């Protein structure tokens, strides 16, 4: 059985706008394992994106704890959290978040240089990673010259290039058609299997369920106990949490 890479206990988060307070996470427990794709599913506004932000070091919770790769993440100072994210986390978002002026190679090199790689080594790894996601013919293209599916593959290459142990994808297929969506989730599943990464995908896209090792359903800031993909499809299977 694969080992736990990420574990959250009792997470709570409340936003306040003027006099209005909205609790978006309510004592949430969660875990993800190395080598698995864990999918968090639920309707818009259920707290999925807030959960992934808190677990990945992007948003500090009001209460609870996150243990990531053996570190008690939110006991660290802000700079230490930033270093942890840079060293161990890869992020993929529905809006791609690409730099308009950079070509595909430049998008990946930019991250690798921040990780401390020299220019030549960063370029070599960028090319290797982009070719691995099927973009070998598009290395010099800028975002405006790429399709939506190609942009998302650049974003995946950027996340994978530094070989992260934790990969977080927030609605990675929402802007894509069915064919490109299947390509994206297959690449994430390959990252889990081949790189032993823990991959957490937040989505409300039911097309992705078949690609998950474990599925968790979320609604109104609460999360149900994780279940295997087989159990989510009606087959008897014990929880592996």
Image: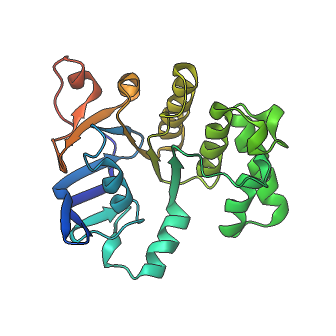
Question: Image quadrant of residue 223?
Answer: top left
Q: Residue at horizontal 30%, vertical 34%?
A: 214
Give the image location of residue 121, x and y in percent.
Answer: 80, 59
Q: Is residue 20 left or right of residue 143?
A: left
Give the image location of residue 205, x and y in percent.
Answer: 38, 29
- Pick whichever, 174 or 61, lies toward us: 174
Q: Is residue 203 left or right of residue 158?
A: left
Q: Can you say which quadrant of the picture contains the N terminus?
A: top left
- Pick whichever, 33 or 21, lies toward us: 21
Give the image location of residue 122, x and y in percent.
Answer: 77, 58
Q: Is residue 29 visible?
A: yes
169 above or below 64? above
Q: Is residue 31 left or right of residue 115?
A: left
Q: Residue at horizontal 36%, vertical 51%?
A: 49
Q: Is residue 10 visible?
A: no
- Pick whichever, 92 or 65, lies toward us: 92
The chosen color scheme is: rainbow
How many numbered markers are drawn?
A: 0
115 above or below 187? below
Q: Is residue 15 left or right of residue 33?
A: left
Question: Image quadrant of residue 19?
Answer: bottom left
Q: Can you say which quadrant of the picture contains the C terminus?
A: top left
Query: Most extreme residue toward the front, as rendered?
Result: 18
- Pick whichever, 133 or 195, lies toward us: 133
Give the image location of residue 16, x and y in percent.
Answer: 25, 69
Q: Residue at horizontal 30%, vertical 54%?
A: 51
């Amino acid at each position: 059985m694969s080992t736990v890479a990420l574990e959250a206990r009792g997470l709570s988060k409340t936003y306040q706008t003027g006099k209005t307070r909205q609790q978006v996470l309510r004592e949430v427990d969660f875990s993800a394992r190395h080598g698995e794709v864990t999918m968090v599913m639920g309707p818009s506004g259920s707290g999925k994106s807030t959960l992934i932000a808190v677990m990945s070091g992007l948003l500090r919770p009001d209460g609870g704890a996150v243990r990531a790769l053996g570190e008690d993440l939110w006991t660290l100072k802000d700079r230490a959290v930033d270093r942890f994210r840079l060293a161990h986390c890869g992020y993929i978002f529905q809006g791609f978040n690409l730099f308009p002026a950079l070509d595909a190679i430049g998008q990946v090199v930019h991250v690798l240089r921040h990780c401390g790689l020299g220019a030549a080594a960063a370029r070599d790894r960028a090319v290797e990673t982009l070719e691995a996601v099927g973009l070998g013919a598009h290395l010099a293209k800028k975002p405006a010259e790429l399709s939506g599916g190609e942009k998302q593959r650049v974003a995946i290459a950027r996340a994978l290039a530094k070989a992260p142990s934790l990969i977080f994808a927030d609605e990675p297929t929402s802007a894509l058609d069915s064919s490109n969506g299947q390509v994206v989730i297959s690449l994430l599943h390959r990252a889990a299997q081949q790189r032993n990464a823990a991959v957490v995908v937040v989505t409300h896209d039911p097309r992705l369920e078949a690609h998950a090792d474990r599925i968790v359903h979320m609604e109104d800031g609460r999360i149900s106990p994780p279940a295997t993909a087989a159990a989510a499809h009606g087959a008897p299977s014990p929880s592996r949490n």
